[in-house]
Amino acid sequence: MTKRPKALIALEDGTVFEGRAFAGSGEVEGELVFNTSMTGYQEILTDPSYKGQIVTLCYPLIGNYGITEEDMESYRAHASGLVVGECSRIRSNFRSVKTLPEYLEESGILGVDGVDTRAITLHIRDKGAMKCIMSTEDMDPDSLVEKAKASQGLVGRDLASEVSVKEPMIWQPELQKKTVKRVATIDCGTKYNQLRILQDLGCEVHVFPNNSTAEEILACKPDGLFLSNGPGDPEGVQKTVSEIRKLFQAQLPTFGICFGHQLTALALGGKTFKLKFGHRGGNQPVMNLSTRAVEITSQNHGFCVDKDTLDPNEVETTHLNLNDQTSEGLRHKSLPLFTVQYHPEAAPGPHDSMYLFHDFMKSMGV
C-alpha cells in the first residue's frame, strides 16, 4: 500500500492541524468551513457555492458509496479542498463509477484525512470560519500560517462570475417533455437539481450569465425569473444587483434561493453581513412564519441578509432560522417576488421545502 504524504492545515489565527493526503498533492488556499450532512459529499463538492472554500465534513467516514454520474450538481467540483476524518478504502454502490479519491485526483482537488474533524468543527464554531492554507509541500507551520493570513478570503470577492455560464443557454431542451411556462434563470452558481425541478414542473429554463443585462433577459419573453444560489460575497456583484433591480420593475414572478435571496435583499435596499461560521448542512431548522410549521432544511451560506435593513412597509420576513433567528426568507408586499435563504431542491438534504417550487409555479398562473 502506497504511503500517503503528510499534509498540514494552517489557519490564519495560527492553529495548525496535521493529516495525510488521500487524494492529490500540492498547496491550496480557501476559507475553512464545516458541513454537518451525513451523506451527499458528491453534491457538496460539485455545488458551485463552495467555490473558494475548503470543506470539512463532520461525518467520520466519507467515500463509502463512491461517485455516481447522476448525482453531479454542476459540471465539475468547485471546492478548493476536502477534509475528512477517514476516507473509505472501498466503495459499495451499484451506480458508482469511481472512488472518491479518483474523482478528487481527476478534479485537481486536495483531499486530506486522518484529521480530528471534531476539533476543527469546534474551533471554527468558537472562533469563526477563517482563511486557510492546506499543503503537502510546505511543512513549516509558521510559513503556512503567514500564507493563510496573506490569502484573499471571501469578503468583497466576486466568485459568482467565475462559476456562472459564459453564454446564454436553454437547459437540456432534449429532455423537455412538456412546456407550460418559460423561466429566465440568472446563473450565479446554480445547482442542477434546481433546473431539473423547474423542467419537471413544465418550465422551459433559459439560463443567463450573471453579467447579463435586464434587456437581454427580458428579450426571451420569460413568464418568471429565477435567481440561483452562488459563492462568495453578494456585495461583490453590484452589477448583477443593479440589473435585478431593473428586472423587478417588469413585475415578473420571481423566486430566489440562497445567493438569490441575498441579491434580492440588496436590490430592495437592504444589506448583508458575514456570519461567524455560516450555516452548512442538511439539518437546519427553519420556521415558516405564516404557517408556524418548522422545516428541516439544507443550507450552505456564509453571508446573511440583515432583515432589519429592509423597509417593513414593502418587505416582510417569511422564514426564520430557529438556531440564531437570522433571515431565511422574504416576500415583497406589492411585487410578485419571494425568496428563501435555504435550499429547497434537497441535494443533499430533506424534502420539506419542495412546496416553494410549486408556489413559484402558482405565481406564474399554473
Image (cartoon, grey):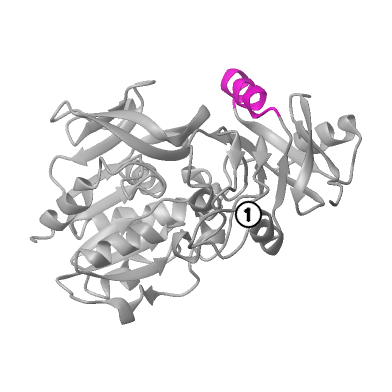
Tell me what residue is drawn at x 56 percent, y 63 percent.
Answer: 76
Residue 225 coordinates in the image, percent (x, y) = 26, 60
User: Is 25 included in the stretch rendered in magenta?
Assistant: no
Q: Where 362 sits versus 135, above or below? A: below
Residue 156 coordinates in the image, percent (x, y) = 57, 42
Which stretch appears magenta?
116-128
Looking at the picture, tell me which residue is in the foreground, 300 or 98.
Answer: 98
Q: Secondary structure at mark 1?
A: helix
Q: Where 98 sits versus 4, above or below? A: below
Which residue in the rendered view is the most extreme toward the left? 365
**Quadrant (top left/top right/bottom left/bottom right) for the C terminus:** bottom left
Q: Main secondary structure of the magenta part?
A: helix
Tell me what residue is drawn at x 48 percent, y 52 percent.
Answer: 43
The residue type indicated by label 1 comes to Leu
Which residue in the rendered view is the most extreme toward the bottom? 174
Looking at the picture, tell me which residue is in the foreground, 356 or 62.
Answer: 62
Q: Which residue has dot 1 on it?
A: 100
Residue 231 visible in image = no
User: Which image quadrant is residue 173 in?
Assistant: bottom left
